[in-house]
Amino acid sequence: MQNEANGNANTSYRYSILCISGHYFGVEVSHVREVLLLPKYTRVPNVDSVLIRGLFNLRGQIHSLVDISTFVNLPPKKIEQTDFVVVMENQDLSVGVVVDKVHDVLPIENNKIEIPTREMPLNLINYTHGYYDDAVLGRIFLLDLGVIFKSKELARYSY
């Protein structure tokens, strides 16, 4: 079933396509502030180290380094020096999400977005607003940053 509830069916949005553990995820480019190579970061005691990997300084602003793997039904990501950080914003919250790579920016039409199905893992249903089947990359899950950023897991660490 196709999702036309998000506005005009012919409307197209641009998504940054991220790769995490061999799976592709899309984030609307309006939420992506910048992409950078994995910066030096400091681990933080007494926090969920699977979710919050640490803190990093970006031009004088401190950001949390977040691994969203558990939100999307993947095992915790093994951080590599070749990883990237995508600084994402949603309303007044800004975090750095660690990813394997940023693949591309794709325009995706609303009428090509499929709604989540019961066959998908519950975490994917809860934290995505749909998926898009790309001819080259395969299935791309479109992340719902509003839900992820308001989740109880992240909310307890917001400052």
Image: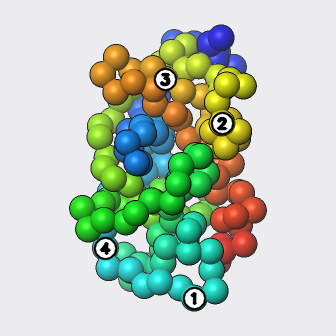
**Along the horizontal axis of the image, is 16 left or right of 132?**
left
Residue 89 seen in render: no
Whole-number angstrom distance, CA of label 3 to CA of label 4: 31 Å
Residue under numbered circle 2: 121
**Residue at 62% from the left image edge and 13% from the top image edge:** 2
Secondary structure, mark 4, is loop
- The first of marks 1 and 4 along the sequence is 4
- The first of marks 3 and 2 along the sequence is 2
Verify CB contact (< 8 Å) between mark 4 and mark 2: no
Q: Is residue 58 above or below residue 141?
A: below
Amino acid marked by disc 2: Pro
- The first of marks 3 and 1 along the sequence is 1
Whole-number angstrom distance, CA of label 4 to CA of label 2: 32 Å
Question: Residue 105 in the image: x percent, y percent?
Answer: 33, 35
Amino acid marked by disc 3: Tyr
Judged from this view, the residue extending furthest toward the bottom is 45
Residue under numbered circle 4: 39
Q: Is residue 84 above or below residue 48?
A: above
Secondary structure, mark 2, is loop
Residue under numbered circle 1: 45
Occupied quadrant, residue 45:
bottom right
- The first of marks 3 and 4 along the sequence is 4
Amino acid marked by disc 4: Pro
Q: Quadrant of the N terminus?
A: top right
Q: Which mark is residue 132?
A: 3
Whole-number angstrom distance, CA of label 1 to CA of label 4: 19 Å
**Residue at 48% from the left image edge and 78% from the top image edge:** 54
